[in-house]
Image: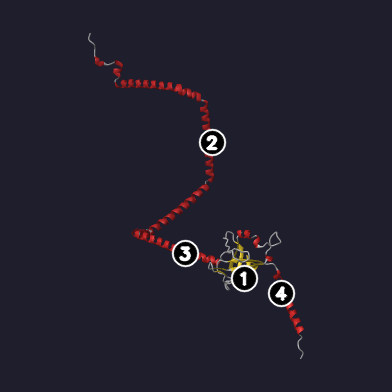
Amino acid sequence: MSKANPAVIGGFVIGGLALIVIGLLVFGGANWFAQRNTYVAYFPGSVKGLRVGAPVDFRGVTIGRVTDIKVLFDPQEVSARIPVVMEFDPTQINVVGDEKIAPLQQDAERLIQAGFRAQLQSQSLLTGLLFVNLDFYPGAPVRLVGGREPYPEVPTIPSDLEQLQQSAGDIAVRLPQVVDRLEGVLTSIDAGLNENRADIRRIVGDVAAISTAIEEQMPEIGHILANAEDATGDVRRAAATFDQILQTNSDAIGALIDEWTVTASSVRRMADQLNATVAENREGLRDFTQTGLYEYTGLAQDAQRLVDQITRVAEELERDPARFFFGDRTQGVAAE
């Protein structure tokens, strides 16, 4: 039995390794030599569920991965920080109008002022794994720790769950005050009810009496409603009859309106003629009112006096005609 040649075995192993390296370079291994930018972020809460190799996304597009997670303990301040180191792949980001991607540290201030923040979000509710999401949150506070890591720092904001927990904590803190105020309001309401209990009972009694009276008067109310319905029907029928009369006599009504229009025009013309006549004789009327009317008044007074005298003579003649013609005979004959 012949022994295996060591040179052949060594060549086969070296050839296999060479094929593996070539395959890795062909199927993505070339990215190992690509330039990557490293950054660090300090998240305020727990990073449970975040693993090394977790994706770093920008609005759903993976642009990097988490390369390191560790705990930095400060014995003097008795505090701990958890830096999360991330690598960004610049080939995943294209800048409009610029062929080269500027590192974050060269434009960090402008990006931070625009709201560039990192936030932990859930990959799956079943697994509980987290990933780092990058986005712009205008108005969000700038939270920078300023650690000793030699990487530019990305500001962070609490996750949605942490914000919900913080809101719940704030509500829990304010809850006793709310309960105290609610108890005070309920106490005031109870005191008011106790003070006005008699009035409330009287009001309830009055309402019950009114309800009873209304129930007793329901037949009469029904009768009134029935009469009102009949009256409504009569009004509708009268309106229909009136409308029919108008439609039947529409021609006569139109002729009457035309006659009224003609009559109104005639009256208007007569008024215009009267105004013209008065305007033409305005001077004579004014002279008559100033002089002739005065003289006519005097003549009327003289005529009235003459009529009075004639009336008295007539009355005397009627009472004693002899006396009127022969004088007063009671005086007798004068002595010679």
Q: CA distance from mark 2 to mark 3?
A: 90 Å
Q: CA distance from mark 3 to mark 4?
A: 57 Å
**At x 54% / y 44%, what residue is drawn?**
251
Which label was assigned to residue 24? 4
- For the question of whether residue 205 can be seen, the reply is no
What is the x, y in percent for residue 24? 71, 74
Mark 2 or mark 1: name the one nearer the start of the chain. Answer: 1
Q: Nearer the viewer, mark 2 or mark 1?
A: 1
Which label was assigned to residue 173? 3
Disc 2: CA contacts within 10 A as few (<14), some (14-19) or many (>=20) = few
> In this figure, which residue is indicated by the disc labeled 1?
68
**At x 50% / y 49%, what residue is drawn?**
243
Q: Nearer the viewer, mark 4 or mark 1?
A: 1
Disc 2 to disc 4: CB gap under 8 Å: no
Q: Work out whether residue 191 or residue 323 is closer to the camera in this orientation and state it.
A: 191
**Which amino acid, by three-letter code, is at mark 3?**
Val
Q: Nearer the viewer, mark 2 or mark 3?
A: 3
> In this figure, which residue is indicated by the disc labeled 2?
265
Q: CA distance from mark 2 to mark 1?
A: 108 Å
Local secondary structure at mark 3? helix
**Which amino acid, by three-letter code, is at mark 1?**
Asp
